Amino acid sequence: MEVIIVKDYEEASQKACEIMLNVVKNNPTANLGLATGSTPIRLYELMREDHKKNGTSYKDIKSFNLDEYFGLDQSHPQSYHYFMCHNLFNELDIDMNNVHVPKGNGNIDEECKAYNQLLEDNPIDIQLLGIGSNGHIGFNEPGTPFDSVTHKVDLKQSTIEDNARLFFNGKIEDVPTQAVSMGIANIMKAKKVLLIASGEGKAKAIQATVEGPKTTDVPASALQDHPDCILVVDEAAASLLKNK
Ligand code: F6R
């Protein structure tokens, strides 16, 4: 695990953008594993700006998102599909046929099976991750086995509260209690992993991920075994690390 400590959210987003663009420029047919949530919003803005200014092309790029809320249609403004379109895809030249976000409705077992097959057929070149304050990656909550693949999950109360704070206009009762998520084994298969963490709310999770034991209690600690994993962490999120 390589840990890069930067000053703040802006610097973390700039650094992450540099790493993402490097992959896209070196491999115009790269498969990108993408995340939602508040953390990558500025990174996505920087990618849109770069596309506009420098013409970096996504026309042969494929994308695969980590997760989706269960029960929300793609057109729901809080769905992750909607989030991705509005924060990134709508302003890139990506072919929407190459965009993949797990479906949160329909026959979920079939959807999960199909998504796993899709990931088998399209190995991810770089997987972007945020991290939950409880150490989750994707929606793999504490206790999820490291050999898990795309599956339906029950969200922990802390995740529902975190997500209500930032989205759903603060209305906890509107946050779905379940989601569909790539599993930890899917994430570990990516050739490169890039995790961004910002703010002191992530400090405990980052300390446990980097310096704690590898344990399913902290899903992100599985990344200790990944051969090419970069953590871009701002000073607040790095504040509890003992070895800086
Ligand atoms: C989102 C995802 C989640 C978030 C995590 C952090 O696709 O998979 O693991 O990355 O919950 O969320 P934020 O960035 O809102 O703090």
Image: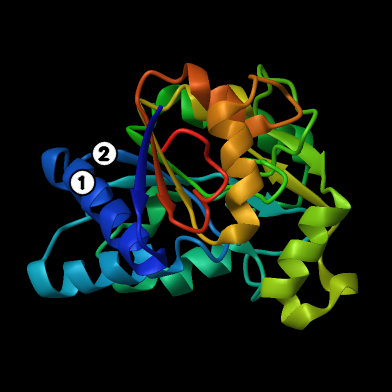
In three-dimensional space, the C-alpha distance between marks 1 and 2, rounded to whole angstroms, equals 6 Å
Q: Secondary structure at mark 2?
A: loop
Task: Report whether residue 60 is seen.
Answer: no
Q: Secondary structure at mark 1?
A: helix
Which of the 4 image quadrants contains residue 193? Answer: top left
The residue that mark 2 highlights is 30
Q: Is residue 103 above or below residue 7?
A: above
Determine the residue positioned at 45% across, 68% down. 41
Q: Earlier in the sequence, mark 1 or mark 2?
A: 1
Which numbered tag is attached to residue 90? none
Where residue 114 sits in the image (x, y, percent)? 61, 32
Farthest residue to the front: give it. Answer: 242
Tag 2: residue type?
A: Ala
Where residue 221 sits in the image (x, y, percent)? 60, 27
| Residue nearest the viewer, comparing 38 with 89 | 38
In the figure, is residue 241 to the left or right of 174? left
Instruction: Count residues near mark 1 (Cα–Cα under 10 Å), then give few for <14, some for 14-19, many for 20+.
Output: many
Q: Is mark 2 within 8 Å of ligand 1?
A: no
Q: Are marks 1 and 2 in contact (CB under 8 Å)?
A: yes
Tag 1: residue type?
A: Val
Farthest residue to the bottom: give it. Answer: 169
Image quarter in which the N terminus is found:
top left
Image quarter in which the C terminus is found:
top left
Which of the 4 image quadrants contains residue 128? Answer: top left
Which numbered tag is attached to residue 24? 1
Classify the position of ligand 1 by quadrant: top left, top right, bottom left or bottom right.
bottom right
Determine the residue positioned at 17% across, 45% down. 22
| Residue nearest the viewer, comparing 59 with 43 | 43
Q: Is residue 64 above or below residue 166?
A: above
Where residue 129 sits in the image (x, y, percent)? 49, 45
